[in-house]
Amino acid sequence: MTVTPSAPDTGDYRALLRAIPKVDEVMAWLAGGTEVNGLVGEDVPPRLLKNVVRQMLEEYRQRILAQKPLQIQELQREQLLPRLRQRLSARLRPNFRPLINATGVVVHTNLGRSLLPETATANLAAVASRYSNLEYDLTTGKRGSRYSLVEDLLVELTGAEAALVVNNNAAAVLLVLQTLAAGREVIVSRGQLVEIGGSFRIPEVMARSGARLVEVGATNRTHLRDYEQAIGDETALLLKVHTSNYRISGFTSEVAAGDLVKLAGQHRLPVMEDLGSGSLLDFSRYGLVKEPTVQEVLADGVDVVTFSGDKLLGGPQAGLILGSREIVEEVKKNPLNRALRIDKFTLAALESVLRLYFDDEQARRQIPTLRMLTASYEENRRRAQRLRRRLKDLPEGCCKLELAEVNSRVGGGALPEMSLPSCALALTPLTMSLNRLEQSLRTGATPVIGRIEDDRLLFDMRTVDDGELGELAAALQQALAGG
Ligand SMILES: *Cc1c(COP(=O)(O)O)cnc(C)c1O
């Protein structure tokens, strides 16, 4: 029996509504639990089970009321229970879970930005489940500061006089501006009024900090004299923003940090630089584009530098504030600092990541972000070949597989101009649409996110780990079989 939209008031329609089982009835079918528990492989909490049953029955009711076609058999035990099981297993999966990033975008803001090295996840797990000296000084037996756990490391690694870490770089910028310039003026070049994805805009953060923005220069060119002319009694700070996510090219000029520092010195003003994707490693040594390192910016005499922990540093989400002792001490005393402070998990991960930087090569090999950014085309090609070998038993005629030369991106608003030659496995499905395959991979138990280019689904091997190849192959097999 099917109800069609043209016959909403028939007895069939009412019969369908009456045929929806009661929640308790379905619960009784499930009594003993074997029907669902067997399938999902664990005990289902009764409250969750009841909620899922209720939601599902309500959806049937809405479907009938909306006059959508429905077979009465769908409301009967034999058809209803398997659907319920499907739903339950989806509900029992964590909402937040790992996935395979085959987009080739290394610092992918939507997919978790940076991955932690093993030493960091081990340290994280250790302090997460045990008590720790988070705010306890083990030498004096007195109350300690959480910041001291990473401050010395940061000072040693960068040459800064002092350091502080907060929740993210947006918080770092807000906190420093609020501390040094609330109610006063901050001079910034027009070419550096950037917006970072997710609504972080320099002018807006500045407004929230209580500082007044004074724009100088033109979009493409700003000169030292522009800053000089804008300096007045109300000036608190000269701010330089690293335009990490875009480039102005052509007829351009920017004032070098060193020149800005000299000018500021003559007026006894501090210089701040928001480095965004601050790096401790010189990427140009690995054939990548030259970006100023944190050490270089500090050596130029910039008084305070801020950057993200989870962009090119390759650590946890955090905002690092490095600079002169005087400024960092002032920032530490700002009551806002407490609202922006990092938690113990971040600290544990950050400390481990920082320790790897005492040896550049060790950092490059062990920190996933750095390893992926510096991986060669050849390395990625070998991985693509391994994936293709794992897929040799796919049903004949289901798809076309080929290796493709592609360009991966750094992501995270870092090194925008740089494209990294990489190798992808390119798949053209022959028995289903590309969109259907993409969706099926995205919604599987371990979601796989690739990218569509030229009517093919690409799996860029730059961001796939060797240890993920088995899972990736299985997900592909399953998704292709679903067609
Ligand atoms: C990314 C970025 C930020 C924001 O950093 P989060 O750590 O994401 O808060 C601020 N400024 C610049 C220049 C950036 O590139």
Image: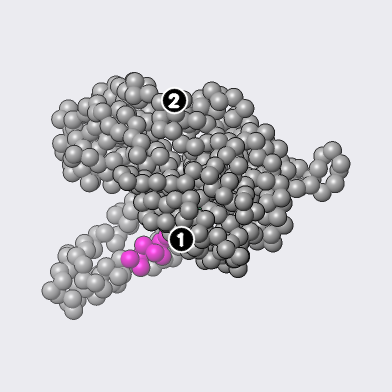
Give the label on residue 215, or none. Answer: 1
Q: Does residue 434 show up?
A: yes
Residue on which the image places disc 2: 286
Q: Residue at x 51, y 61 (%)?
A: 230
Query: Which mark is nearer the camera, 2 or 1?
Result: 1
Residue 322: % across, % down: 63, 44
Within 10 Å of disc 2 (Cα), the crowding (few <14, some 14-19, many 20+) is few
Characterize the magenta stretch by its predominant secondary structure.
helix
Q: Closest to the observer: 57 or 303?
A: 303
Start-end of magenta stretch: 52-59
What residue is drawn where x is 25% and y is 41%?
452
User: Nearer the N terminus, badge 2 or badge 1?
Assistant: 1
Residue 124 seen in the figure: no
Taking the spot 40% from the left edge, 33% from the top edge, the residue there is 289
In-image side of 7 versus 15 (left or right): left
Quadrant where the N terminus sits is: bottom left
- Residue type highlighted by circle 1: Glu
The single residue placed furthest to the bottom in the displayed view is 9
Please state which amino acid type lies under the numbered disc 2. Answer: Tyr
Q: Nearer the viewer, residue 53 or 461?
A: 461
Q: Is residue 290 above or below residue 452?
A: above
Q: Position of residue 72 (x, y in %)?
A: 23, 63
- Looking at the image, residue 366 lies above or below residue 88: above
Q: Which mark is residue 27?
A: none
Disc 1 CB within 8 Å of nearest ligand 1 atom = no
